[in-house]
Image: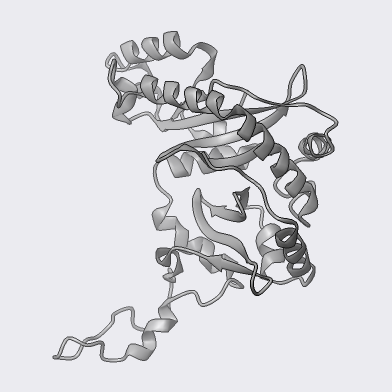
Amino acid sequence: MVGRGLSDDFINEFNHEYDKGSWLYELVNDKEIFMAIRNGSISFYSRGCSIIKLTFNRRHKCLTGGTHYKYLLKPEIEGDCYIKFNNDGGVKDPDVLPNLLVNDLHDIKTLKKTVKPFAIGEKVQSYKIIRKHSNIIDTEIELGEHSFIDLAAIKEGNEGAEITFYEVKLFGKPELRMQNTEKGITHQMLKYTGRINKNRDLLTKSYRKVCENIVALKGVGDSGNQYSSNVMDLINRVAKNELELFIRGEPWLIVTQFDRNQRNGKAWKPHMERLKKEFGKRLMLVGDGRNVRLK
């Protein structure tokens, strides 16, 4: 289980760079980009893909960024799209190779286009859910070794603020139809529940720190960007310790990407009834992520 939170030095340098109106300003204010605070870093997501991981270099007192090389290949280039080789197998004109790549973070628009081929499966549906909700505070949350749950949302409950976790599954995933097996969804969700409850104190501390960071980071907490004014009011009260913060131990299951015929099919009906019995109100069957309404 990994905690969450940024150092004061990170935040100060972030705000300094933001005030310049540079690439970071554009990134933070891009409404298609979702920002998630990690342990000493920030991940920026486009279409469900982590396109930039921002860290703080303590030695040089500056921000540093990284991305997977696959996101740097330009989707459109001028001229010939083919790379030619010599008879010895070498590239005929190696000087053209750098022109195929996004060279810096100022070109956010192109960087978002490079992501499209890799935005598939549950990433797409999670992205649709994120775009429809201004209270999602985290994504791809590590709950243990090689164990990640898709979404975390914050809302006000009866006794204070609450963090709820959600797992997103596509209708066609075989684990939804598996019973009494470790690969089935029931076992997976029970494992999530166990790890959430085991790490409840760390999760509470981490997400209170995330709230503090959101308030402190320039542009991030501005209403209308990632969070609505009501959500920012809630986050502010958590950051100031005006509200207790609670972690809901049982995650919700969102099953999506299906049509009416698939939902009403005879083959699916027994699995749907079993899932309803096992998860009750924590099961959400919604054909498309853009129509999900988190509870």
Q: Is residue 124 left or right of residue 36?
A: left
Q: Position of residue 128 (x, y in %)?
A: 54, 41
Q: Is residue 282 above or below residue 226?
A: above
Q: Residue at x 38, y 19 (%)?
A: 186
Scheme of image coloration: one colour
| Position above or below: 138 against 272 | below
**Where does the image place residue 240, in percent across and percent down from the top left?**
84, 38
Quadrant occupied by the C terminus: top right
Rendered position, 147 above or below 175: below
Q: Nearer the viewer, residue 114 or 266?
A: 114
Instruction: Depth check: give the residue in front, 133 or 139.
Output: 139
- Residue 160 located left or right of residue 184: right
Residue occupying the point 38% across, 10% down: 273
Residue appearing at x 73%, y 50% in the figure? 225
User: Looking at the picture, how far across and down is residue 119, in whole percent?
Assistant: 43, 51
Seen from this angle, which residue lies furthest front?
59
| Numbered-mark total | 0
Kindly tell me whether residue 198 is visible in this rendering: yes
The answer to which of 168 and 131 lies nearer the viewer is: 168
**Residue shown at the point (37%, 28%) measured from the top left:** 171
Q: Is residue 135 above or below residue 267?
A: below
In the shown orientation, is residue 120 left or right of residue 290? Answer: left
Q: Position of residue 291 (x, y in %)?
A: 56, 31
**Displayed quadrant of residue 27:** bottom right
Task: Work out whether residue 285 can be spotted.
Answer: no
